[in-house]
């Protein structure tokens, strides 16, 4: 089915819904690489006019990828809640945008729609929004998840402590972990990207984190970000697995390129749930996503990279995760060319995930060959803070020495918490106070207490 718009007397035709969405998308290098982008800004505006007039129901009537050939499409269709969709069933995409920006669209009112909104609807409405719109709407939405602490409450900003090391050296990892804990990081997760995919190595890292956690009674969760099948093997061998990690994407073929399927994810979720290691909840899946993943695997089915990215949130949502984050600039300038495109993508990903009820955070990052710098990351960090991101990721000095990319530092997140008056997860904040790492005003103390000084010296 073709879609049309007339702009200043010129008639524009978009061959199908995929073409309409792609041409309405803000400019980015990945869509241009794939030959999907609007040919110029005029065509982009025309596509947005046509998209604004499109009924939301069109996404139910015309699936972008047939459910018969794609299990993510089947998941989206099978889990769609018609009753939750009913209040907005009469709306066009433009109407939906206007409602989301209205006073009537409170956080609870939006939350009531979560299961009625498909990823494609979320992607479509985001294409009609400016950056401030994405922030304003996402800020209303609270998505809360729990394991050993509570993530996503309003006025809170959690941090993933990422103590990576290029050789998985335990002393190097321990030093980075201590550095982060002393600066109030780690309430989202203490999560290590291992240098190898060895099951034995992953188990050693999990034991290292768990020993520290138990010794100091830290209300936080650990994760080794290895392939999900390795985590299943570690569970079978008695490792102290808290969270199950996996990168996911928005099509069956893209997930297959990661070596996963919905059934494998369900197996891992069931295995970890059987351990019952959570104390305040049992949300224990941790997913990472990022625009360009499906395109890089040639598994995008002609969809623009932002739309296919949003479909990954349906995969995440199906498993009630504790954490989801977009690694927004990690894939490189072939997909997000510069700071402007990275900032826009980060805000889109956060908005769309929250609109679908997914507990979303972000790795605010870029690779060294992208046209971006730390000032761009400061802008995205602050905008995501205003938008109410559940968590952000930090490493010592903002430079990941194992993955060789630039992200945020522990001090960046401390600055953001201070500027916004945001606080750590409540259970973790109480622990910081008990350990003498936080003063009565909620500020990280300049000098660690004597018992921690002894640990540092050792």
Image (tube, rainbow, N blue to C red):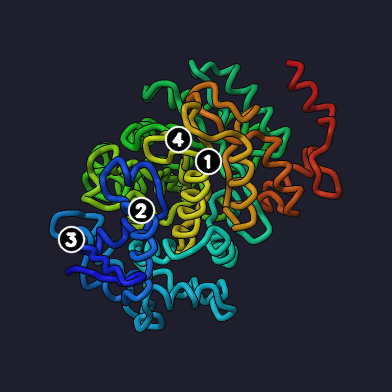
Q: Nearer the viewer, residue 384 or 114?
A: 384
Density class for disc 3 (Cα within 10 Å; few <14, some 14-19, many ≥20) is some
Q: Which mark is residue 330?
A: 4
| Numbered disc in front, either 4 or 1 | 1
Circle 1 SS class: helix
Rounded to the nearest angstrom, the CA distance separating label 3 from label 1 is 36 Å
Q: Residue at x 50, y 53 (%)?
A: 360
Quarter placement of the N terminus: bottom left
Q: Identify whether 312 is placed above or below 126.
A: above
- Relative placement, left or right, of 14 versus 435 is left
Label 4 close to label 1 by CB (< 8 Å): no
Rounded to the nearest angstrom, the CA distance separating label 2 from label 4 is 27 Å
Q: Nearer the viewer, residue 155 or 363?
A: 363
Rounded to the nearest angstrom, the CA distance separating label 3 from label 4 is 30 Å
Q: Residue at x 61, y 30 (%)?
A: 398
- Where is residue 296 drawn, in percent x and y? 29, 37
Kindly identify which residue carries mark 1. Answer: 339
Circle 3 SS class: loop
Kindly identify which residue carries mark 3. Answer: 67
- Relative placement, left or right, of 455 versus 245 is right
The image quadrant that residue 60 belongs to is bottom left
Label 2 close to label 4 by CB (< 8 Å): no
Rounded to the nearest angstrom, the CA distance separating label 4 from label 1 is 12 Å
- Where is residue 317 drawn, in percent x and y? 39, 58
């Amino acid at each position: 089915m073709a879609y049309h718009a007339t702009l200043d007397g010129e008639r524009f035709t978009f061959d199908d819904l995929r073409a309409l969405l792609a041409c309405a998308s803000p400019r980015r290098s990945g869509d241009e690489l794939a030959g999907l982008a609007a040919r110029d800004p005029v065509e982009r505006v025309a596509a947005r006019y046509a998209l604004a007039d499109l009924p939301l129901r069109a996404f139910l009537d015309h699936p972008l990828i047939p459910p018969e050939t794609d299990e993510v499409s089947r998941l989206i269709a099978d889990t769609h809640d018609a009753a939750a969709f009913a209040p907005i069933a009469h709306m066009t995409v433009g109407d939906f945008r206007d409602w989301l920006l209205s006073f009537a669209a409170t956080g609870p009112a939006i939350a009531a729609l979560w299961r009625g909104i498909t990823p494609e609807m979320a992607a479509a409405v985001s294409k009609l929004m400016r950056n401030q719109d994405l922030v304003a709407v996402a800020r209303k939405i609270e998505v809360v998840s729990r394991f050993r602490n509570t993530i996503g409450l309003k006025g809170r900003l959690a941090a993933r402590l990422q103590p990576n090391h290029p050789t998985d050296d335990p002393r190097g990892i321990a030093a980075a972990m201590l550095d982060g804990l002393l600066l109030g990081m780690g309430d989202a997760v203490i999560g290590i990207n291992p240098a190898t995919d060895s099951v034995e190595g992953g188990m050693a890292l999990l034991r290292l984190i768990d020993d520290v956690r138990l010794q100091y009674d830290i209300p936080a969760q650990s994760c080794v970000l290895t392939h999900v099948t390795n985590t299943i093997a570690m569970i079978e061998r008695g490792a102290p697995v808290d969270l199950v990690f996996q990168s996911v994407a928005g099509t069956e073929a893209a997930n297959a390129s990661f070596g996963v399927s919905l059934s494998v994810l369900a197996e891992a979720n069931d295995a970890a749930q059987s351990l019952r290691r959570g104390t305040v909840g049992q949300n224990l899946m941790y997913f990472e996503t990022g625009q360009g993943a499906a395109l890089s695997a040639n598994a995008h089915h002609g969809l623009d990279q932002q739309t296919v990215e949003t479909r990954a949130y349906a995969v995440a949502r199906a498993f009630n995760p504790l954490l989801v984050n977009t690694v927004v600039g990690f894939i490189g300038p072939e997909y997000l060319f510069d700071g402007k495109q990275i900032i826009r993508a980060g805000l889109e990903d956060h908005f769309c995930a929250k609109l679908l009820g997914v507990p979303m955070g972000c790795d605010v990052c870029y690779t060294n060959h992208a046209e971006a710098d730390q000032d761009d990351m400061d802008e995205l960090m602050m905008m995501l803070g205003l938008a109410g991101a559940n968590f952000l990721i930090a490493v010592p000095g903002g430079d990941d020495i194992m993955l060789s990319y630039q992200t945020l530092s522990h001090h960046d997140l401390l600055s953001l918490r201070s500027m916004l008056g945001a606080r750590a997860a409540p259970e973790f904040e109480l622990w910081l106070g008990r350990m003498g790492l936080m003063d009565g005003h909620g500020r990280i103390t300049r000098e660690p207490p004597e018992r921690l000084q002894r640990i540092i010296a050792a």
